[in-house]
Amino acid sequence: MDGFFLRHRRVRRATLKLIRSLDEEWADFRPTPGLPTVLGLLRHLAQAERSFVSAATGGDWTSPPEPDCLDRVHRQLERQGEEAEHRLRGASPDEEAGLLLELMLEHELHHAGQLTVYLRLGGMAPPREGYKLSR
């Protein structure tokens, strides 16, 4: 699981960096009608993480009130990432749960990529992550 936790932290840092790059007026941006807003996309990401972790641990993770601004969703995702790791360390997930957690990472990467496209369509260059390959 240590490898998963390293990947999860790296992906979450990149997502949080994207969110920090946005002014609050981005919260209601959507590139075309029918797509979620930036804030809606990030709320979905937070809710999905709770669902994935609950399924992987067999527990229940009560949803907090939905954040109403980018600053609050940033803080929620930051705290939630730490809580997810705490819950997972206490549960010792089996192989099937491990697959669910990998899907959770893929889900976050997908939506971080979607957010990057949103920024470009809105005329903003997303921040560069600068991944470090060493531990």
Image (tube, grey):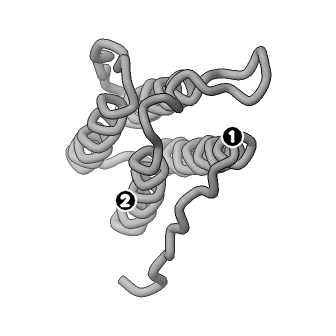
Quadrant, the C terminus: bottom left
Rendered image: mark on residue 9: 2
Up the image or down, 10 lies above or below 133; here it is above
> Quadrant of the rendered structure where residue 50 is?
top left
Up the image or down, 44 lies above or below 116; here it is above
Q: Residue at x 60, y 23 (%)?
A: 37
Task: State the residue position of label 1.
Answer: 122
Quadrant, the N terminus: bottom left
Marks 1 and 2 close (CB-CB < 8 Å) = no
- Say which label, 1 or 2, has the lower sequence index: 2
Q: Which percent across, then down, holds residue 22?
A: 47, 43
How far is disc 1 from disc 2 in space, using C-alphas? 27 Å
Q: Residue at x 29, y 44 (%)?
A: 78
Q: Residue at x 79, y 24 (%)?
A: 32
> Horizontal placement of 51 versus 37: left or right?
left
Closer to the camera in the image, 18 or 97: 18
Q: Which percent across, then down, holds residue 41?
A: 57, 28
Name the kind of residue labelled 1 in the image. Gly
